[in-house]
Amino acid sequence: MKCQSCGSKRLVTLWMKCNDLASVTFKGREYDGNIPDDLGIQGGDDPSFTHCLNCGQIQGTWPLPKSYLEKKGQLHEPDSFDEDDEDEDYSQPLPKLSWAERRARAAERSANQPSEN
């Protein structure tokens, strides 16, 4: 496989597990939750993408159609949330947070989750 932009074979694919702890920034507003499926990378709890180590181009088909975030100002349709998220108001953006504050909030949420054992 070669980079669609520069032809390099220096491609790397990243798979991640984010467990609802992702933040998405769009037009200066931050949103918290799963990564949407319509942003050019595989979304949800396990996003992945391939990019070129030579030029930095994310591999895919561009330009993308308008995402739900662009059209509606929120990450997902309200009925796409888990039932246990019904008390959350995902229509409002989160305040701007530093990376340290984001990590602290993510660690706090992880610590408050029930053990799977």
Image (spheres, rainbow, N blue to C red):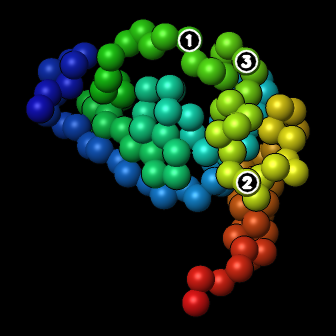
Mark 3 neighbour class, 10 Å CA radius: few under 14, some 14 to 19, many 20 or more: few
Q: Does 11 sit above or below residue 100? A: above
* Pointer 3 or 1: first along the chain: 1
- Can the viewer see residue 27? no
Q: How many numbered discs, if any?
A: 3
Determine whether the residue tagged by mark 1 lies in a helix, strand or loop. loop
Amino acid carrying label 3: it is Lys
Q: Residue at x 58, y 90 (%)?
A: 117
Determine whether the residue tagged by mark 2 lies in a helix, strand or loop. helix
The residue where tag 1 is placed is 66
| Image depth: mark 3 or mark 2 in front | 2
Query: Mark 2 touching mark 1, by CB under 8 A?
Result: no
Q: Does 109 sit above or below residue 27? A: below
Determine whether the residue tagged by mark 3 lies in a helix, strand or loop. helix
Q: CA distance from mark 3 to mark 2?
A: 21 Å
The residue where tag 3 is placed is 72
Q: Residue 76's quadrant in the figure?
A: top right
The residue nearer to you, when weighing 72 against 99, is 72
Q: CA distance from mark 2 to mark 1?
A: 27 Å
Q: Residue at x 87, y 33 (%)?
A: 92
Left or right of 44, for residue 80: right
The residue where tag 2 is placed is 83
